[in-house]
Amino acid sequence: MECYALNDKIYKSLSSCQFEAGTDEYNALKSFMSKHISGALCELYDFLETHDIHHFPKKKQDQLIKKQIQHWNNLMLHSDFLHLQKESFRIGKAHDRNNISTEIYLLGYNKVISHLQRKIFEEDFKDTSLPKKLLNHITNRILVDISLSLSSYVSEREKNSLYFYEISKISSCNHDFKKAISDVLSLTVKRIEMQGICFYGLQSDKFLKSLDTIHIGDDPLADPSSLACREKIIKDFCLENQGTKNENQKFSVLTRKNFPKNSKKLDSLFNKIERYILVPVKIEEELVGVVEIFSLKRKKEEGVVPYKTIEMFSSQLSIILERLHLFINQEKFIESLHNSAFYDSLTGLANRNLFIDRLKQNLKKLSRIDISRSSIIFLDVDDFKNINDKYGHTMGDETLKIIAKSISACVRQIDTVARFGGDEFVILLDSVENEGEAYEIAERILKNCCRTLYINDTKIKNSVSIGLLMLENNDDIEDSILYKADKAMYQAKKLGKGQICVFDSEFVEKINSEIKMLSDLENAIQSNEIEMYYQPIIDVESGCIAYFEALCRWHHPEIGYIPPSTFINLAETSDLILDLGKKCFEIALRDMARLRRAYPTYPGAIFSINMSVKQFHNDKNFQAIKKLIQSRSSSPSSIKIEVTENLLLDSTDHTFEKFTALKEMGVEVLIDDFGTGYSSLSYLNKFSFDYLKIDKSFIDTMNVDEKNLELIRAIIALSNSQNIGIIAEGIETKEQLETLYEMGCYLIQGYYFSKPLPFSEALLLIEKEVSHKKVFKSLQHNIFSIRA
């Protein structure tokens, strides 16, 4: 216990007001104190309790009252000033540690003086001068006690402030989290004057699975005989505190006097320690740690538990752990961002971004080192669509994972294996001696992938096609390199699948022709050579135009008309499809505005525009098209967007978010060429498509191929059951029209009614319908086209 030298003023005050033992004053004071001091102190602690003093239980009050009665009897009747000073300091510390403010402290003592003053004047003293003498003596001694207690109180506050400053500095500045916890534990065990402290970090959702244990000072419970008892106490404490809010967290204080009886294990535990405190450490409502504090030193009198200091300690420890939690989450977030930017989430292989970066580095190396050569292997899974259709999307994913592992097992550490999306894999073989070595690696990959796979007791026969390209030291355009490797792979498929095709001079002329066409197409987009034609979709029940499909056309200034299947498929092999698709939307929306100005009430003023899978998945392009629709269309509901089933092949939550964004704008979405791509009933339910469009390939043979006819019937039944509209495209004969009508398909598109028309001719068709009410007669009149 710390002692402070009495200053002269207090010493003189005590000396000047003192009764000699045996005198009338002394005896009167002794009698008065025995009758009234207990009541005065009870009034003091009742007052403190009414002012919401935390952690000040009734039992502790009774102990303090008993000790303070003894202290004040000594204070009033004796002159051992050093002892009185120590007792005053001890009581001041007790009040501070029980969170009693200075104002409440002084008001409480004022209550005591008023109580004793009242009782003095109620006494019947024979000597009328005694009340005044006793009052002066008692008041003087109480004020001295207050002064000494407050000295200790202020000293404790200063120590707490310094302690709080030190642990706050540690918790906010130290990035070595284990050292920060250790430093806070060291400061705390010194501040609360105990001998040992131990922190247990608890792993989230795994009870008492220690992440880390940090111990400071003595550990009397480390021997095996105490471990089981210790673990039980901690486990019970965790159960009590798990899930409670921070403000409701409880400390557990066990001493030799209050631990559960009839327990030999606990008895043996507390034979070693004086006091054992458990403190919960939480982040929000989750228990993330437990702190043990123990005292080995036996004392005649049990000290006050320093709740206030422990609360500060628990709070700062929570801050350190929360910073650690945020730091770990930040590291994980940065790692996940890096992985999503450079690695494929399904297979863990490099993605296109990382592969292109490695390829660029390799090309730089090739330009510097003549003797080194590299190679590109472009691999595609044969008939992967059939695996998805037959066994489901999950089985398809498992197949891709196995293929990824099979490829990785065949290459070297210096090589890069990437998944480009879907069922395409690309491998960069670094530093091969010649084409023969590259071909050997390609053969190993082919053999390892072309085999029967067993997935969840399902037997899947798998094969792949490979294109092989040797890099030259003058290659410098990565898109051109991948384009060549891709072409070699498709040539392997044409050879019968499960083959390897090496890109050589035979490809050069064709490749150069395609590269020139891509360049010309890029110029065509910029110089407005691209046009939009419009083919009507007819409601055969009414004979009216339901809407128009906008179709892209290109008249090359030298070659002339180029079929859409040629230049659109070519654009799909590069990012040029993004610019082409955006251009188509711009022209179609411009023509839509012109149509609505000419015929503001015309119900068929609706355009359906195609969007490629690349356009849909490219965030920048998708947002640009959304803005075009919002800014250039007075009514987004007059726009329909056609996508193919391949959009669903790599669908993610992000795909669904984009789909939902279009629907919320009022745009209807159609599946084009239904039945030729990836079909799944679960995706039809999830994406809520507005229409299915039956592909022309089924229509062409439906009247001669019974299987195709039944397939069309099933598609129409499916659309009706899902409340999805159905459209048939490619209708060229009356027989086809009547068959579809009988099966319940009433929206028809095809040359039987009209070929795709330039915008000016589409306007003439609309004018004719508006004038004659109908351009096409309904089926009740044996539908036929009214030609101009």
Image (spheres, grey):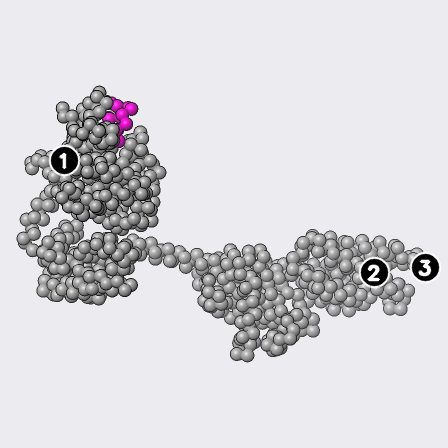
Can you give x and y, in whole percent of width and height, for residue 191 in the image?
A: 59, 65
- Whether residue 217 is in magenta: the answer is no
Circle 1 residue = 733
Q: Quadrant of residue 370?
A: bottom left
Can you give x and y, in whole percent of width and height, for residue 453 in the image?
A: 22, 64
**Amino acid type of the residue tagged 1 in the rendering:** Thr
Can you give x and y, in whole percent of width and height, for residue 293 in the image?
A: 57, 68
Image quadrant occupied by the N terminus: bottom right
Residue 648 seen in this snapshot: yes
- The majority secondary structure of the magenta stretch comes to loop
Secondary structure beneath label 2: helix
Secondary structure beneath label 3: loop
Indicate which disc, 1 or 2, sits on the residue closer to the N terminus. 2
Image quadrant occupied by the C terminus: top left
Identify the residue at horizontal 54%, vertical 64% (top origin).
238
Vertical comparison of 300 with 542: above or below: below
**Amino acid type of the residue tagged 2 in the rendering:** His
Identify the residue at horizontal 11%, vertical 63% (top origin).
439
Q: Are marks 3 and 2 in contact (CB under 8 Å)?
A: no
Circle 3 residue = 126
Whole-angstrom CA distance, mark 3 to mark 2, is 19 Å
Can you give x and y, in whole percent of width and height, for residue 713 in the image?
A: 23, 43
Circle 2 residue = 36
Crowd around label 1: few <14 · some 14–19 · many ≥20 (10 Å): few
Indicate which disc, 3 or 2, sits on the residue closer to the N terminus. 2
* Magenta-colored span: 594-606
Vertical comparison of 421 with 634: above or below: below
Identify the residue at horizontal 15%, vertical 46% (top origin).
705
Q: Are marks 1 and 2 in contact (CB under 8 Å)?
A: no
Decide which of 302, 399 is in the foreground and name it. Answer: 399
Vertical comparison of 477 with 94: above or below: above
